[in-house]
Amino acid sequence: MTKKGVIRCLMALLLVAYIGVAVVMANQQSARDKCRGFDIRILQDDGSRDFVTQAEVRRLLKEWSLDDTDRPASSINLQKIEDRLSGVVNIESAMVERMPDNTIRLTLMPMIPMARVFDFKGNSYYINRDGKRLTANARYHIDVPVISGNFDSIHSPASLIPLVECLHSDPQWNAITSQVMVDPHTRDIILVPLIRGHVVNLGDTSDIPDKLTRVMTMYRKVMPIKGWEYYDTISVKWAGQVVATRRAKSIPEPAIRFDQEGDIEEEDINSMLVATDSDTTAVSH
């Protein structure tokens, strides 16, 4: 090796040694640097507004004794903070990370309620898409679909979230659905529309779009002719059918009256109906 080559090798070794020492010193200095505070970022959504605030997060950190900014930033247990925040009922998810300037960034997604649950034990709470609960109170009131029934670990309200999402995504059904009930005896899923006088029996959560289409066909082609109070139950629990049960007694005068004019002749409507001895009407789809 020439003299020039030896000099280049020595310079390269010195450069590597310098970089190594600089990195070690920088890490040591970083380890000694105190935390420069908490940068709390809340990803707000129309469905989660005010469920989580920066003031509440700071209060929780202080309550858990995890807000000590006099310590080196590298010694703060980020995973512990993240786990504690993720366990808060009104927080959907949390991510905690140390930034290059030694601030601790907390990025939080508040819980997004999908429905409010009323069970037959007198409890009321919100649930998100995964069934996580948030206790209902005046501060956290939000307009979401209502689910009621007798729920347990086998029959949970979270199992109805796909139905709730389907109703919410359809402008017509979203506008006319009052609540979703689960019959305590048959476990049938019952829709209670804002149209007073009847309920809709879906049976279970299978083929929901098809079932809702059949009910809407009944609304458009039959109900305006027969009258909105003529039936007390419209059942679409059986494939390809709409079975409407005739009302046994009258109901009080409705608060909202509907247009009684249909878009087809009554004789065409009657051709769709098949009277039965059990006082029900079946409509084939």
Image: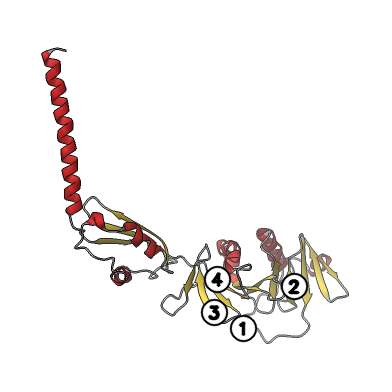
- The reply to whether the C-beta atoms of the residues labelled 3 and 1 are less than 8 Å apart is no
Q: Give the image location of residue 172, x and y in percent.
A: 59, 65
Q: Which residue is mark 3?
A: 123
Direction from residue 230 to residue 276 in the image, left or right: right
Q: Secondary structure at mark 3?
A: loop
Disc assigned to residue 255: 1
Specify the quadrant of the image occupied by residue 3.
Answer: top left
Residue 61: x %, y % from top left: 30, 68
Secondary structure category for the residue under label 2? helix
Q: Earlier in the sequence, mark 3 or mark 1?
A: 3
Tell me the residue that label 4 is attached to.
145
| 206 vs 223: above or below | above
Q: Secondary structure at mark 1?
A: loop
Q: Nearer the viewer, residue 217 or 129?
A: 129
| Relative depth, front residue between 100 and 72 | 72
Camera-nearest label, 1 or 2: 1
